[in-house]
Image (cartoon, coloured by chain):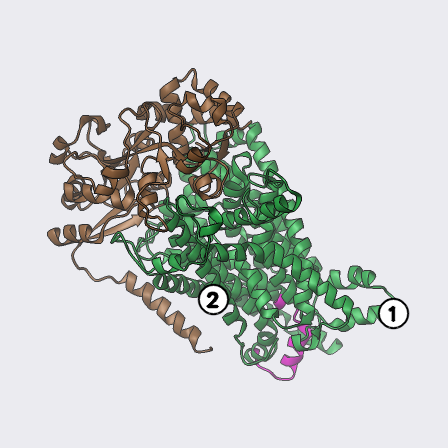
Chain colours: A brown, B green
């Protein structure tokens, strides 16, 4: 026992020492991103082989934390490229001026609806929708029809059935607040929320607790929750026993979802501009775009990319999600959340 | 006695200069470490933040103090922490008594088990509470069955009760360890004598035992309070949107709104509260602590004999089992239970034993770049934990030595309260501080894996100092002087007098440093390298995705984390320092 301790120490010191003394090998490109980032081993390896480069990923917390860290690093950037800023944080990143513009040739392939920065400092990579999800079995056994609009949620039949996340602490919660603002407009969304409170909506601070504790599917009491449009295919891929029918479904009727678009940008002050450009091109290319869905359950902005059958079978993508512009979000985020808090929680 | 006084008087001039130098040398490491990794990043982020304030440095403070909602957040932060600390002491002190005074089979196991909650990720604890107390939890189902109720009678989701229960769950081990260890070295003859002289049990407890224990009790209370005061995950996840502590508000202001000036003002407010409290504590502690006759455990502990004693022990153990162990057991049970009935089947029919979640941990179905085997994650967690233990002890031993040797010295009086600050500082704020400050050093540490054990050590270091100082202070100066007079060199005095007496306290300190690192305290402050995930990081990865298999694997990994933590604590328990025997 006595010998074990110095040994562990030696190993620990050695490991940390090695990390410091990394020998100069292939060029290293550092990509800063949020905690949910994932990619296939072979897709990244292909890029590394093609450019004789090594990609170092840095996971920097949730989207907001990662963006704020990139901003605070200032002129001495933590990485060459930042991936994962979404349309709810886009204006903050652009105002703080952390990106260098780059007009990637691949932008031509991407529909204009995704391009929210005309100066091409932030380039769209993928999107996902925040939608109402419901427990299929619950609605079957209770002989209920799932809601088809936001207004439906005020129906007496859905009293006490809905759980939503707090927009102050949760990204899907904020997206759902934007859905209601996009649909009802700034002057009427609070009336809707007041009516939701009357209809016994449950507010939870985080997505994890909403999904795994309050959702009837996992032993909770609420059969309708706010989650992602891609959650039902997730339920199939990560089922306990193989199933061929998702046990949950997303409501994708017009104006009931909010689209989150994620962007990539080259960080100001990078010393690897050319390699960074190659990486951005790679993220927009079909190789990376086709890898996105099964890794992060978000969807390619490049229409050339083919979807895995699991998504063509089980994924429902809304045609007309609610829309609120990044500029309006940046302008009103605080006052909207505060007004919401005042109406719903007080 | 007079002889010693004379000797001390004679040597006071040169001796005190030398001892001042020694004090400074002892302080050197800790001061450098804290300056570089705590004060420098903290000051940097505060400066950056206040520079963004439009109306000058004072305006965010005026905004914070002038806002009724911020004042109510401050008030809630204080009273929930006071209440939680009080309840934790009420639950912990009888347990500390049991672990200190009695030897019984399973004693070490009980101690290890009660330490496990400390490392569990909050999201998993929320799941455990839900399994026990949720609408479909065991307790509600049992009560509904028993009384034929239609609806679950107990609702703890989003209540203060959930917050308090979780704080007790997490922090009782601090009281058990700190007070229990100190208690086990108190000479039982004193209380025996008091009873012989006619005092009843309660009088003895009140007038003899409690005053002697006070230094340990207030130390434990301080640490528990600071944890509750800066509570984040418990409030956010178990308390729900109706409750916010300063830390929750700092997160909202700094991250969601990027209102850095207000976040900084709130951080300063939080820091000031903790500093004031720690200063009060330091004064109280130096007044209360006195040299005690320290006894080895073999001497102070007795067997559980007599029916009253056994009943008492059974009740204490039952309380600890219900509050601390039952949620863990619920988690472990769920990790081997099928979660989902297959479609069309009755729920009861398909519930059964399964090891699928454990088996699946060894598979990388999506060929993800960031997949690691669970054994690798355990290895990474243990490496960080070992590094944290070593680093925290290397810094903590000299600091506590200096504190205990001469607590009246100016440098000690100044530094004592400052040592606790990292524990009472907002992890969100400090994390942003790392990004602002640590890129300017010769080595860019901002995204280095080295920063992880360093961040863990910032939290562990105050614990180490607080575990060691009472033990070191309790050494009678006379013992040292006697040894010195008999011709022992200072090194021999340390080896034969100080070390054996402190040995146990070092183990307690090591256990805390180990648990703090394993539980990833303060790690949210650090940018993570996805190729080196720890076990808690892996648990969060699974929990952040929908799907029964993801949820099950998170539960399985949590159970593995429990085993690693319990095993690690039992292993530390078995260390013998300098072959001094069971102390």
Give residue B361's position: percent from left, percent from top: 35, 58
- Count the labels in the image: 2
Q: Chain of mark 2?
A: B
Q: Would residue B276 be visible to someone looking at this image?
A: no
- Give the crowd class for mark 1: few <14, some 14-19, many >=20 residues within 10 Å: few
**Compared with residue B180, is residue A110 higher up or lower down, i.e. above or below?**
above
Q: What residue does disc 2 label?
A: B394
How far apart are labels 2 and 1 at the CA level?
A: 46 Å
| Residue at horizontal 13 percent and vertical 54 percent from the top | A49
Q: Quadrant of the N terminus of chain B?
A: bottom right
Q: Identify the magenta region.
A: B471-490
Is disc 2 placed on a helix, strand or loop?
helix
Q: Residue furthest top?
A: A187
Q: Main secondary structure of the magenta part?
A: helix
Give the residue furthest to the right: B198
User: Measuring 70% from the left and 58% from the top, which residue is drawn there?
Assistant: B287
Task: Work out whether residue A179 or residue A2 is closer to the camera in this orientation and state it.
Answer: A179
User: Foreground: A136 or A38?
Assistant: A136
Q: Is residue B496 above or below residue B404?
A: below
């Amino acid at each position: 026992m006595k010998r074990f301790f110095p040994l562990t120490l030696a190993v620990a010191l050695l490991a940390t020492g090695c990390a410091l003394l990394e020998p100069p090998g292939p060029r290293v490109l550092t990509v800063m991103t949020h905690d949910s980032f994932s990619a296939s081993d072979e897709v990244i390896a292909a890029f590394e082989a093609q450019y004789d480069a090594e990609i170092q990923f840095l996971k920097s917390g949730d989207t907001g934390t990662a963006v704020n860290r990139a901003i605070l690093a200032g002129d001495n950037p933590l990485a060459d490229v930042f991936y994962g800023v979404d349309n709810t944080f886009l204006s903050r990143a652009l105002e703080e001026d952390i990106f260098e513009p780059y007009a990637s040739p691949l932008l031509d392939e991407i529909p204009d609806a995704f391009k929210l920065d005309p100066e091409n400092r932030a380039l769209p990579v993928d999107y996902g929708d925040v939608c109402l999800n419901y427990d299929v079995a619950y609605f079957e056994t209770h002989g209920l029809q799932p809601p088809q609009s936001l207004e439906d949620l005020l129906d007496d039949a859905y009293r006490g059935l809905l759980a939503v996340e707090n927009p102050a602490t949760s990204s899907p919660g904020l997206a759902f607040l934007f859905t209601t603002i996009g649909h009802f407009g700034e002057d009427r969304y609070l009336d809707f929320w007041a009516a939701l409170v009357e209809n016994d909506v449950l507010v939870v601070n985080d997505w994890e607790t909403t999904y795994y504790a309050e959702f009837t599917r996992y032993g909770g009491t609420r059969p309708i929750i706010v989650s992602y449009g891609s959650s039902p295919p997730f339920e199939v891929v990560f089922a306990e026993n193989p199933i061929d029918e998702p046990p949950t479904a997303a409501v994708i009727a017009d104006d009931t979802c909010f689209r989150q678009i994620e962007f990539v940008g080259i960080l100001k002050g990078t010393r690897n501009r050319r390699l960074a450009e190659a990486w951005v091109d790679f993220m927009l290319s079909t190789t990376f775009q086709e890898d996105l869905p099964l890794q992060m359950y978000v969807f390619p902005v490049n229409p050339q990319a083919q979807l895995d059958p699991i998504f063509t079978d089980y994924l429902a993508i809304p045609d007309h999600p609610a829309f609120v512009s990044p500029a309006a979000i940046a302008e009103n985020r605080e006052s909207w959340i505060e007004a919401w808090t005042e109406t719903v929680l007080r | 006695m007079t002889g010693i006084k004379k000797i001390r008087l004679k040597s006071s001039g040169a001796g005190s200069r030398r001892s001042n130098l020694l004090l400074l040398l002892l302080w050197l490491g800790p001061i450098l470490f804290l300056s570089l990794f705590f004060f420098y990043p903290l000051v940097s982020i505060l400066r950056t933040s206040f520079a963004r304030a439009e109306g000058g440095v004072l305006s965010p403070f005026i905004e914070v103090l002038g806002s009724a909602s911020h004042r109510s957040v401050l008030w809630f932060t204080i009273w929930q922490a006071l209440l939680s600390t009080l309840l934790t002491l009420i639950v912990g002190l009888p347990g500390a008594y049991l672990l200190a005074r009695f030897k019984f089979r399973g004693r070490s196991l009980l101690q290890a088990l009660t330490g496990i909650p400390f490392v569990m990720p909050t999201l998993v604890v929320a799941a455990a509470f839900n399994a026990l107390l949720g609408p479909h939890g065991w307790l509600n189902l049992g009560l509904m069955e028993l009384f034929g109720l239609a609806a679950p009678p107990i609702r703890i989701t989003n209540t203060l009760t959930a917050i308090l229960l979780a704080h007790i769950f997490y922090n009782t081990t601090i009281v058990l360890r700190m007070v229990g260890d100190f208690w086990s070295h108190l000479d039982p003859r004193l209380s025996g004598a008091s009873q012989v002289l006619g005092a009843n049990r309660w009088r003895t407890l009140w007038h003899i035992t409690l005053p002697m224990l006070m230094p340990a009790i207030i130390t434990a209370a301080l640490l528990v309070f600071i944890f509750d005061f800066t509570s984040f995950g418990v409030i956010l996840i178990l308390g729900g949107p109706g409750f916010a502590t300063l830390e929750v508000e700092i997160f909202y202001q700094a991250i969601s709104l990027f209102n850095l000036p207000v976040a900084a003002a709130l951080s300063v407010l939080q820091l000031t509260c903790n500093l004031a409290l720690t200063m009060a504590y330091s004064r109280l502690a130096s007044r209360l602590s006195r040299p005690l006759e320290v006894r080895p455990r073999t001497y102070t502990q007795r067997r559980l004999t007599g029916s009253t004693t056994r009943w008492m022990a059974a009740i204490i153990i039952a309380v600890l089992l219900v509050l601390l162990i039952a949620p863990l057991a619920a988690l472990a049970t769920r990790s081997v239970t099928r979660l989902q009935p297959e479609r069309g089947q009755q729920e009861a029919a398909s519930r059964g034993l399964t090891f699928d979640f454990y088996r699946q941990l060894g598979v990388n179905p999506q060929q993800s770049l960031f997949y690691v085997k669970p054994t690798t994650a355990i290895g990474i967690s243990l490496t960080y934990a070992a590094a944290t233990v070593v680093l925290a002890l290397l810094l903590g031993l000299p600091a506590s030595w200096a504190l205990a040797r001469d607590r009246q010295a100016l440098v000690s009086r100044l530094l004592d309260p400052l040592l606790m600050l990292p524990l009472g500082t907002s992890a969100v704020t400090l994390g942003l501080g790392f990004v602002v400050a640590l890129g300017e050093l010769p080595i860019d540490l901002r995204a280095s894996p080295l920063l992880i054990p360093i961040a863990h050590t910032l939290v562990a270091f105050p614990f180490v100092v607080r575990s060691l100082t009472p033990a070191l202070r309790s050494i009678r100066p006379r013992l040292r002087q006697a040894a010195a007079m008999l011709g022992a060199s200072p090194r021999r005095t340390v080896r034969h007098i100080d070390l054996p007496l402190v040995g146990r306290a070092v183990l307690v300190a090591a256990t805390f440093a180990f648990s703090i690192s394993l539980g990833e305290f303060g790690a949210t402050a650090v940018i993570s390298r996805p190729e080196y995930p720890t076990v808690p990081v892996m648990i969060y990865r699974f929990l952040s995705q929908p799907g029964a298999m993801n949820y099950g694997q998170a539960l399985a990994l949590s159970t593995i984390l429990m085993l690693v933590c319990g095993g690690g604590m039992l292993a530390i328990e078995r260390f013998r320092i300098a072959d001094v025997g069971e102390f």
